Image (spheres, helix red, strand yellow):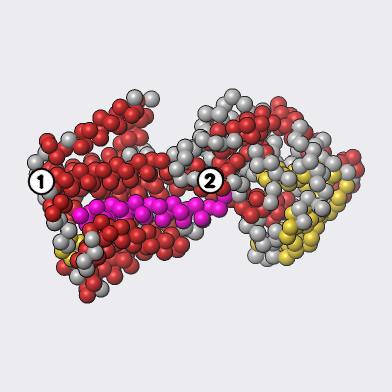
Amino acid sequence: MKALELSNVVVRFGALRAVDGASLSLEQGERRAVIGPNGAGKTTLFNAITGVIRPAEGRVVIQGWDGTRASPQARARRGVGRTFQITNLFPELTIAENMRVALRGLTAAKWNFWASDEAGAGRGAIAEALAAARLEGQDEVQVKHLSYGAQRQLELAMALVQKPRLLLLDEPAAGLSPVERGAVADIVRALPRDIAMVLIEHDMDLALGLVDSVTVMHEGRVLLEAAPDQIRGNAQVQEVYLGRAA
Amino acid sequence: MRAVFILAGLVALASMPLLLPSYQLGIASEILIFSVLAMSVNLLAGYAGRTPLCHGAIFGTSTYVVIIAAAAGVPVWAACLLGVAAAGGLSVVFGIIAVRTSGVYFLLLTLALGLIIWGICLRWTGVTGGENGLRGDLRQGWLADSQRLYWLILVVGAVLTFAMWRLVRSPFGLTLRAIKDSPSRMAALGHDVPAHLFAAFVASGLFAGAAGALYALFNDFVSPTTVALPQSVEGLLMAIVGGVGNILGGLVGAFVLIALEQFVSAYTERWLSVLGLTAIAIMLFAPQGLLGLLQRKSQ
């Protein structure tokens, strides 16, 4: 069974076809980078996979389940985890509270009206995810007081604590210093190999060093699929990034 | 230490009937009732990030039902339960309509829903008594004594406050606080945001309904003024003045506004202007409310 299958997905914003018939297939455990210049439709494609946007045409099949019309929460329950291009956390809550909210997203514990919030909160799973994201020892720090790099790491930890089977990372290293980018790359590299992953990243070196395969998008369409080695010197890729030589 | 403070506070509140004359005891009862209303507003405004302007209508609906049911021969305790149930039912309807909106749209939608209830109470004269309202006959026997009534209100108010305190500190409460920060992230994490907001709306409405039932016992009279917009605004203002996002803010806000109203109105007819200016000053200089200001000073 494929981790993800997109068939002719179309997303329209008025007259603009932001994603124009994109198809993509991902094996379980495969790591795929989706690259392309600004406006290529990468984040819109992510939003179509996660249910933030419903495609006008095409199908989104997750682990053999047709989720084309499903809500974001239904897809999350099917094992789809994601991080956001611009960090999307709960700034007024502490790291521990952010993690508990993430963990409970997939359980009925969130409906408990009476017990203490801290009781039975899966401390082991939370500690494991925070360790994987290298964010230990700061549980009671309010997220609004964290550095941007640490917020990026928390985004990853929150996705990981849900034990996703398909993880979508939307520019996880955007806005970080070279040292922080290296740290994020190490974290992503160390993720369990059975998680299928789709990565959007503008830093080509970073992206190509983390994945098994690459999909190049341009103007909403899939231009090319190839191994990372074939992408580096590809004339078509250079053309969409740099423009046609005069 | 906190338990000692709470216990001391409860003892102080419980000793009021022994210290205060009848009129002031009435004001203390009113403060307790409206603090429950303000806390119920706070559940939505402070924790879920949805500011309602219909809680006066929910509160007043319960008051109407208690008085009408008791007049029809239903025992007072059962009439009170019916009042809370009616508030819960109304909250279900309001919640279904309102929870998919946010910000100013939520505010205006709940305002409109509250106005509908006010209009019904004003015009459905055969049932509600129209502008003249309805006088009840609830303060009989045990309830005729204002000291006993105060203690009853205190006990019920304390139980409701404890329940709300548990709720906001529960996993459900944390979910609400997270929804306030980022609904889109919550959906991506698998949370059903509208369902949680709906549950919070109904819970908040039940608490407002309980306050309305206590108000029926206390006031023994209800009119369209009880369900009117100013009642909703007052509940919200109490929550803001005390501190949104802090469940005891409602108690502080109710105390400040009602005490100020009683005190200032004894000296000037322009007491509403003074209240307004006070509320503006608190919002400008203590946007987290008086409890928020106290907490900041103590840190």
Three-letter amino acid code of the residue under disc 2? Lys
Three-letter amino acid code of the residue under disc 1? Tyr
Q: Is residue A169 magenta?
A: no
Q: Is residue B205 magenta?
A: yes
Which residue is the site of mark 1?
B23
Q: Which of the two marks, 2 or 1, is nearer to us in this view?
A: 2
**Residue drawn at (56%, 29%), measured in percent from left and top?**
A139
Q: Position of residue B178 (x, y in %)?
A: 51, 43
**Residue drawn at (60%, 49%), measured in percent from left and top?**
B190
Is label 1 in a helix, a strand or a loop? helix
Q: Position of residue B204 (x, y in %)?
A: 38, 52
User: Nearest the camera: B105 or A141?
Assistant: A141
Which residue is the site of mark 2?
A110
Q: Is residue B283 above or below residue B6?
A: below
Q: Position of residue A29 (x, y in %)?
A: 81, 43
User: Nearest the camera: A84 or A68?
Assistant: A68
User: From the image, which quarter does the N terminus of chain B lie in?
Assistant: top left
Q: Quadrant of residue B65?
A: bottom left
Is label 2 in a helix, a strand or a loop? helix
**Residue drawn at (50%, 52%), measured in percent from left and top?**
B196
Q: Position of residue A203 (x, y in %)?
A: 76, 38
